[in-house]
Image (tube, grey):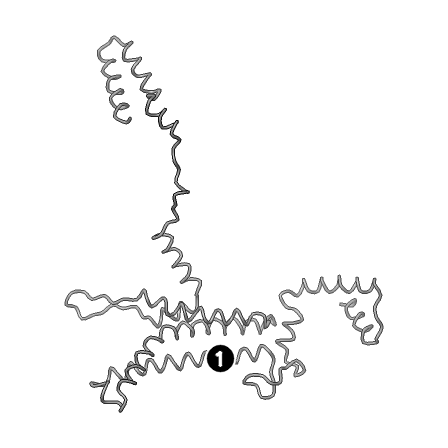
Amino acid sequence: MRTIKATDDRLIGKKWPDAGQRSDFEQAYAKLAAFAAPVTARTLRFTSSDPSHFRKSAFLARDGASEATIWSRTLTVYTLIFVGVALAGNMADQVFVASKDPISGLSGYPLLLHILRVLLDTAVPFTFGGLGACTYLLRSLHDLIHKRQYDTIYNAEYMSRMLLGMVSGGAIALFVHSVKGGDATTVIQLSSAGLGFIAGYNTDFLFSAIERVAAAILPKVGIDTMQTADPKARQATVSEPPQALTDALKAFAAATDPDVRGVYKAVIDKLTAKL
């Protein structure tokens, strides 16, 4: 730190350091970077509360804010949007179920309401997948901000995680089905919203499950992976009897005791049956 501070003082005094001083500074800075990793000068600037590091024309920040605060507010807005769509879908289900005549008794545009209900029902798994992804990202982001490790380079990864959460939430609903037992009125059904939230929170779980299912159903077997026997070896195997059978035939021919010959006869029959 003394070496870095001395170099800083020289630059403030407009005194350019010589080659030896620059080498000492680079070595000191490399040691400091290794010690403070993953905290860097960029992460300190992006998580700083100093107004000099704020972005003035920031989204949802009239007086400016740090990059970490801006992205936290952006994720909060996305989360609230997903919550709003989920609430709208739940309310639409409740209203249509409570109404005896849901198509004609609510408005002068019954077809539009029906289409809106279908769209909301379809969007609910995707919505909960995105909500789960936003929940995970908010928790991770706040932990990074607390540790002064947030960097804007990860914003693209956050957006990809959110998109994967939405896709996973909708894809996992394909595995949901209802089961009815005979005349029983109880219906066992997994919650597509709950599964969508879990899939969005942990997208790696869904993709690993799909890979395991694909590996079990579609094994990687091809013609080039099959072992073929050498024609010469196969011909030799067919034309020449095994050594054990040859020895048994010789012992059978040399034996004079009927009991011993009977034992060798049984061995010869078993070896012959395996050819």
Q: Residue furthest front?
A: 231
Residue visible at 78% across and 72% down in the picture: 8
Q: Residue furthest bottom?
A: 108
Name above or below for residue 235 compared with residue 51: above
Q: Quadrant of the N terminus?
A: bottom right
Q: Residue furthest left?
A: 183
Q: Image quarter for residue 163? A: bottom left
- Residue 31 picture location, percent across and down: 71, 62
- Residue 111 picture location, percent across and down: 27, 84
Q: Nearer the viewer, residue 86 or 144?
A: 86
Q: Image quarter for residue 199? A: bottom left
Q: Secondary structure at mark 1?
A: helix
Q: Image quarter for residue 207? A: bottom left
- Residue 135 picture location, percent across and down: 46, 73
Residue visible at 38% across and 36% down in the picture: 228
Name above or below for residue 85 compared with residue 207: below
**Image check: 182 left or right of 41?**
left
**Image check: 43 left or right of 140?**
right
- Residue 232 picture location, percent across and down: 39, 27
Residue visible at 30% across and 68% down in the picture: 190
Q: Which residue is mark 1?
A: 76
Residue visible at 22% across and 15% down in the picture: 262
**Image check: 50 left or right of 262?**
right
Q: Quadrant of the C terminus?
A: top left
Residue flagged by tag 1: what amino acid is it? Answer: Thr
**Image check: 219 left or right of 51?**
left
